[in-house]
Image (cartoon, grey):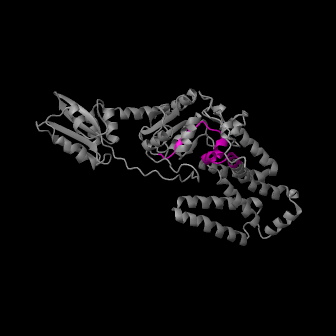
Amino acid sequence: MLVFFNKEKSNNAKKQVASYRSIEEVLKHASQSSDYVKREETSLAHEQLTIHFFESMIDMQKLPSHVLHPLTGIRTYTFEILKEKLYTTEMKECNTALEADEGLLRGSLLVQFYENGQKKNVLVDLSYQEDREVTVPEIEFSVFGSKESFIESVEVNMNLIRKRIPSSDLYMKKYTVGTHSKTEVYIVYCQSIANEENVQTVTQRIRDLEIDQIQDASMLLNVIEDRRSIFPQIIDTERPDRTAGALLEGKVALLTNGSPQALIMPVTALEFLSAFEDYFLSWQAASALRLVRLMAVFFSNFATPLYVAILTYHPEIIPQDLFASLVVSRTAVPFPPIMEALFLEVTIELLREAGARLPTKVGQTIGIVGGIVIGTAAVEAGLTSNVLLIIVALAALASFTIPIYRMGTTIRLARFPFIIAAQVWGLIAIALVSVLFLSHLLSLTSLGRPYMAPLYPFSLHDMKDSILRLPQPMQNLRPRFLQTKEKERLIKKRPEPKKDIDDGF
């Protein structure tokens, strides 16, 4: 559950974290947990050393070989000797209770010993990380291009981006978000390209965020968007290649530890209709696919509402031949068009939700067999007409062509206001709801940038990679709505092909 903090509660939480006056109080509090372990070691000179750690947070297989065994050969304990003898990636002195608390909770050993009569506290990193392998993208799968996707480890995700942009110009700034979860969030951008105002806006929103926990990038997305809306203003992607391409375009990305997705901003509405695979195809094929997706959005939103509106208020506009087929299909249906439309739409959503929540093989069976059985039974029982069944099925299929899953969900839900409006006042109501949706879209922004660019405000140059994708040599400038530092891309024109030796024959 997502829990927001007001300032008073946030200050109380910070006081609670800072209430430990000493490292000993931190250890006393930690000792109440069952996975807390305290070990004492003795050097060859009979000096005492104490190790504190949480058993569930460290790699227990490395503890004997990396720490305990090297300690047995030490005569006297000093920071430099421990740093030389212990096998660890990170070792640093701990001076405050807050550092000790955070170190223990992140998988470090707290080592206490006396050096020259003074008590020393040292944090030795031995954190345990169980990461899954980099796999094929499951949500944004593509036939062409990379077959790598982000995983839950932010270090691996940063590596996947660094491999694609091996440049010192790629900056990654780390912040900790969540009073209790203490989630690591990285702001990623290309310093010489990205607009400084965009970077500062993201940084300010992360710093000002007062929240109990952040467990996934989607939770972060919901609290840093410009405005609460059913339409997403930030793209979440599992593809490292798409993220790298966005960074080189001048956008800003967010990586969250524990989340297999990156957030990309600012974005426009038309970018949700673009798949990264479009850049691996010819510009003609990519443009055709984008037009197909755009038509699919309109069909998914308006097909069922138009059926309800026309049959309820405007039957005169139906052609005579088609009208006879509709009358025959609705002869045994006792319900008005709105009832059968809502029945089928809700049934489709139930099947989709059930298929998503069940195991993969069972979910596929439910989706296919359930759709066929329920659809056939509904028509034979006279609950709906076969014409509407075809329309609803095609509308649902059209909504799945959207490359970004979050926008696809929005498109599916957005059709219900249109269906209800069609029953209230027919085509006029559909037009009014369309105006309301369009007004809302025009008022949205992403990091303060216009959401409907390049349509509004209109930019002919940015139209080269929006509804259509023109050839790469024609896209020598980065999108203007980003207002990047470097306006031009380096695109060398292809040289004229030389004639072969047999061209004259």
Q: Measuring 14% from the left and 38% from the top, which residue is drawn there?
A: 43
Taking the image as shown, residue 187 lies to the left or right of residue 101, namely right
Q: Quadrant of residue 491?
A: top right
Q: Measuring 43% from the left and 45% from the top, which residue is drawn there?
A: 153
The correct choice, above or below, for 476 with respect to 284 in the image is: above
Give how far across and how far down residue 485 sits, in percent: 59, 27
Q: Which residues are magenta?
A: 259-287
Taking the image as shown, residue 24 lies to the left or right of residue 501, namely left
Q: Quadrant of residue 27?
A: top left
Q: Quadrant of residue 198?
A: top right
Q: Measuring 52% from the left and 29% from the top, which residue is drawn there?
A: 191
Taking the image as shown, residue 16 lies to the left or right of residue 256, namely left
Give how far across and how far down residue 128 sits, in percent: 34, 46
Which of 437/256 is in front?
256
The correct choice, above or below, for 493 with respect to 367 in the image is: above
Give how far across and how far down residue 356 sits, in percent: 55, 58
Tell me how many marks there are: 0
